[in-house]
Image: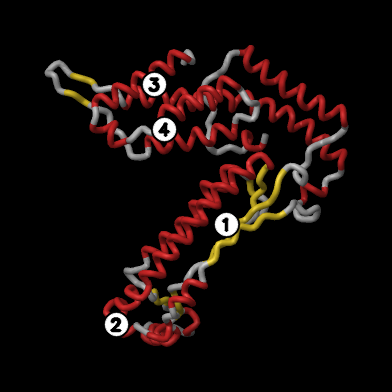
Amino acid sequence: MNSIINSRQLVRLTDLSKSELSEYRKELDEKYEAINSDGDYATLKSSGALISLSCTQYQNMYTHIPLGEEVARDKNAKTKRGVKVRVNLLAENDHRLKAIAKHVSQSRAKSIYPYSFPWTAGQGGMMYVPTGNIPSVMQKTSSDENYFWKLVDEFCLAYPSLKAKMPDVLEDLYDESKYEHVDVVRASFTWNLNWGDVDATSHFFLELEQDKLKDMHDKKLKAISQAVEDNSRSMYKKVHDHVATLIHKATTTVDDEGNETKPRIHDTLIPKMREDCEILKHLNVMNDPTLEAMRADLLNLVTGTDVEALRDSAAEREEIKAKAEAMREKFNF
């Protein structure tokens, strides 16, 4: 349920019919009435796990103390502690290191955060992953780790040649002793995906008494029911908008003079739709068969579709437009 309430992927959009919303509420109430009758309440401890991703990499920056003191003297600073000069050992040649750091950040943003919510503060802090999302997180982070080590191998392979360029780049700032052997450099990279159980003393919520938890649980049911209604509309509209976008992007207009105008097709158009299809799969917590059918049809529509082909081929645009219009008619958008 938290995946719907806390989702940053969806926004409030158009309404479903009252009968459909009523049916959602009925299913939700029946489900939790069964839980309440048994007196068995799902808790955070029993319904998920904690995860954190922490990585280290080669530190290509160091503090040049003598140069800092020199700058402090030249600028008449009262204390040399106020000046620090940092030297980049791979200045103008550190793009591979930046790519590694960016990949780690993207792994958290795309493979962990959409399937979890914060447990401890700070970047790289613990995240709580509901049980149903754990397989997705494991699969995605495993792929991310493989790519991480691929980037590391590429950097280490290039490291000797990068180092050889630095005397000409840094000149008087070049210090051979600051450069580690490539084996030491590689050993500085680590990928640590840490899983843990929800410890009874690790979070204030787990220390609430059972009666407090029940009271909060009952209040949450009402909020969840409303959230299901609001976000079901959002998910339907998300698919609707993508289908409408495909039709628009595949439509060529012709003015009175016979000049054709094609809408601009961005590189991210198709990948974004595929990503949303994957997210919607996890957010359909009520297992709405119509929504799943719409999502599956949209995914099938964009799978194998090439952006370049859409730009260059009128036949390709006509084909995907026809399929999108057929889907719009099928689901009566």
Per the image, the residue denoted by label 4 is 303
Which class describes the residues within 10 Å of circle 1: few (<14), some (14-19), or many (20+)?
Answer: few
In this rendering, position of residue 7 left or right of residue 201: left
Furthest residue in direction left, as rendered: 257
In the displayed structure, 209 sits above or below 149; it is above
Q: Quadrant of residue 122?
A: bottom right
Q: Is residue 121 visible?
A: no
The amino acid at mark 1 is Gln
Q: Are marks 2 and 1 in contact (CB under 8 Å)?
A: no
Q: Which mark is residue 171?
A: 2
At 84% from the left edge and 29% from the top edge, which residue is drawn?
36
In the displayed structure, 181 sits above or below 19; it is below
Q: Of discs 2 and 3, which sits in the foreground? A: 3
At 70% from the left edge and 55% from the top edge, which residue is drawn?
196
Q: Is residue 86 visible?
A: yes
SS type, badge 3: helix
Per the image, the residue denoted by label 3 is 324
Q: Which mark is residue 94?
A: none
Which class describes the residues within 10 Å of circle 4: few (<14), some (14-19), or many (20+)?
Answer: few
Q: CA distance from mark 2 to mark 3?
A: 60 Å
In the displayed structure, 76 sits above or below 10; it is below
The amino acid at mark 4 is Thr
In this rendering, position of residue 266 left or right of residue 182: left
Return the x and y of residue 72 as percentages of the image width and height.
41, 84
SS type, badge 4: loop
Q: First in sequence, mark 2 or 4: give its number.
A: 2
Per the image, the residue denoted by label 1 is 123
Q: First in sequence, mark 4 or 1: give its number.
A: 1
Q: Quadrant of residue 2?
A: top right
* Quarter occupied by the N terminus: top right
